């Protein structure tokens, strides 16, 4: 893996970890009721999606090992281009059901995981 790919993976993992910290101990109602929390989570998802999009261009073979890559890029595109129609239940669901798996995959790729 080249240095640019490593940096992109690190950025994606860092953003994912931030989301985990932001939502720790929060409920969906907390999320919906706190525009600053929503904005922070959405921004981190934008970073993840952009980093993984750039990874696909920089190191396609590494990018194929990130199973959530297409979904992450798709979520980023929705957050950026369809911001007026964001479904908060979907974003919250990703934080609760998919984020840990993404972090674990990124940990492995960065040689920090199991």
Image (spheres, grey):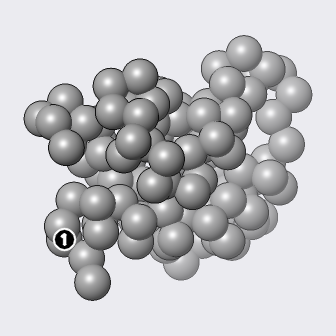
Q: Residue at 33% x, 25% y: name it.
A: 58
Q: Report x, y in % for residue 35.
A: 64, 41
Q: Residue at 85% x, 43% y: name it.
A: 87
- Outermost residue on the bottom side: it is 114
Q: Assign the N terminus to one quadrant of the image.
A: top left
Q: Residue at 68% x, 37% y: name it.
A: 75
Q: Is residue 99 at all visible to an observer of this figure?
A: yes
Q: Residue at 30% x, 51% y: name it.
A: 14
Q: Is residue 44 at all visible to an observer of this figure?
A: no
Q: Which residue is mark 1?
A: 112
Which of the 4 quarters of the picture holds residue 27? Answer: bottom right
* Residue 62 in the image: above or below residue 81: below
Who is closer to the viewer here, 10 or 89? Answer: 10
> Along the horizontal axis of the image, is 60 left or right of 2?
right
Q: Report x, y in % for residue 23.
A: 53, 65
Who is closer to the viewer here, 60 or 103? Answer: 60
Who is closer to the viewer here, 76 or 20? Answer: 76
Q: Report x, y in % for residue 42.
A: 58, 39
Q: Assign the C terminus to one quadrant of the image.
A: bottom left
């Amino acid at each position: 893996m080249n240095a640019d790919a490593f940096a992109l993976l690190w950025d994606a993992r860092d953003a994912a970890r931030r989301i985990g910290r932001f939502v720790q101990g929060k409920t969906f109602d907390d999320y919906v009721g706190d525009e600053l929390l929503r904005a922070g989570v959405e921004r981190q998802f934008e970073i993840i999606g952009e980093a993984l999009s750039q990874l696909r261009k920089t190191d396609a073979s590494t990018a194929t090992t990130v199973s959530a890559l297409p979904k992450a890029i798709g979520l980023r595109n929705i957050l950026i281009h369809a911001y007026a129609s964001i479904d908060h239940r979907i974003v919250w669901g990703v934080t609760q059901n998919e984020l840990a798996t993404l972090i674990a995959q990124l940990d492995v790729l960065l040689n920090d995981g199991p």
